[in-house]
Image (cartoon, rainbow, N blue to C red):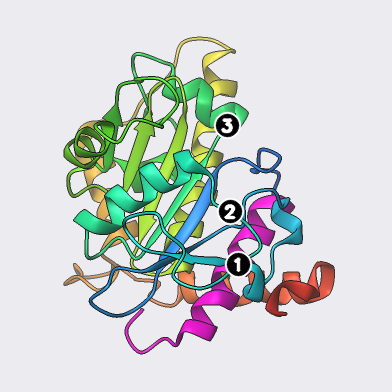
Amino acid sequence: MTGATERQLREELAACYRLIAHFRMSDLIFTHISVRIPGPEHHFLINPYGLMFEEITASSLVKIGLDGRAVEASTHGVNPAGFVIHSAIHGAREDAQCVLHTHTRAGCAVAALECGLLPVNQISMEFYGKVAYHDYEGVALDMDEQQRLVRDLGDKPVLMLRNHGLLTVGETVSQAFLRMYYLEKACDIQIAAQACGKLILPPADVCEYTERQFNEPGRSLEEGELADLDAMQLAWAALLRLLDRVSPGFRE
């Protein structure tokens, strides 16, 4: 995120909203994605409350502070629950530049399971040991819940909100989106597998190794081992090209 201008961040966040809509991870006008603006003020951009995700553009995003007040004039308000969740995390985690929250069918289903996310498939192993859990306390409108959200998230990149939904954080918008895309896919695969019969789970050492392959591609490699350092950047660039074809107005 270092060096990105506010305009660049607006375009990336608007793209993220459009992608969440395109891949059917939105919930009408609800749920939220935010990105922090560089600077000591901890200002961040979030969706204008009332717009569908496919309507959101770079210029329509609302800039607010940690107190929930708009920093610049806007004709739109902000989802109160979005403010409670996002301001808590932006205020506590310097690395959580982007915060992404969803209410998908598969995500809500796994968040309601006692076992949580399991290493059912290669995709889910990206998150092995990386998932935090937060117990349900009602609609996130209570400011006192902020400290418990932050405590439960800790230093993890993923938070499962029990009986509620999913949340990912990232140092960039692209990182938060791609984490959510694959977290959602992991949840979908798990629900399908659990409906079919007894699960076969890989041993812990294999899960740990696979997690490092996903999250530490630049680590020292063993002889004969390969790495894919450019994968996520290539995927994000491909997603932006997709938007230019199917939903090109996000940059406006």
Q: CA distance from mark 3 to mark 2?
A: 33 Å
Q: Residues within 10 Å of mark 3 (few under 14, many from 20)?
A: some
Q: Residue furthest right?
A: 246
Find out whether the residues at labels 3 and 2 contact each other: C-beta distance under 8 Å.
no
Q: Nearer the viewer, residue 60 or 192?
A: 60
Give the amino acid type for the residue marked by disc 3 in the picture. Asp
Vertical position of residue 81 compared to residue 64: above or below: above
- Classify the position of the N terminus by image quarter: bottom left
Mark drawn on residue 26 = none
Residue 240 shows up from this direction: yes
Percent of width and height locating residue 157: 30, 50
Q: Nearer the viewer, residue 199 or 107?
A: 107
Point 23% across, 76% down: residue: 40
Q: Main secondary structure of the magenta part?
A: helix
Point 24% across, 32% down: residue: 144
Question: Which numbered disc, 1 or 3, marks the residue closer to the eye?
Answer: 1
Would you say 79 lies left or right of 150 here? right
Point out the stretch of residues depicted in magenta. Answer: 1-22
Give the amino acid type for the residue marked by disc 1 in the picture. Ser
SS at mark 3?
helix
Percent of width and height locating residue 78: 54, 51
Find out whether the residues at labels 1 and 2 contact each other: C-beta distance under 8 Å.
yes
Give the amino acid type for the residue marked by disc 2 in the picture. Gly
Q: CA distance from mark 1 to mark 2?
A: 7 Å
Percent of width and height locating residue 63: 48, 68
Q: Residues within 10 Å of mark 2 (few under 14, many from 20)?
A: some
* Mark count: 3
SS at mark 1?
loop
- Judge whether residue 13 is colored magenta: yes
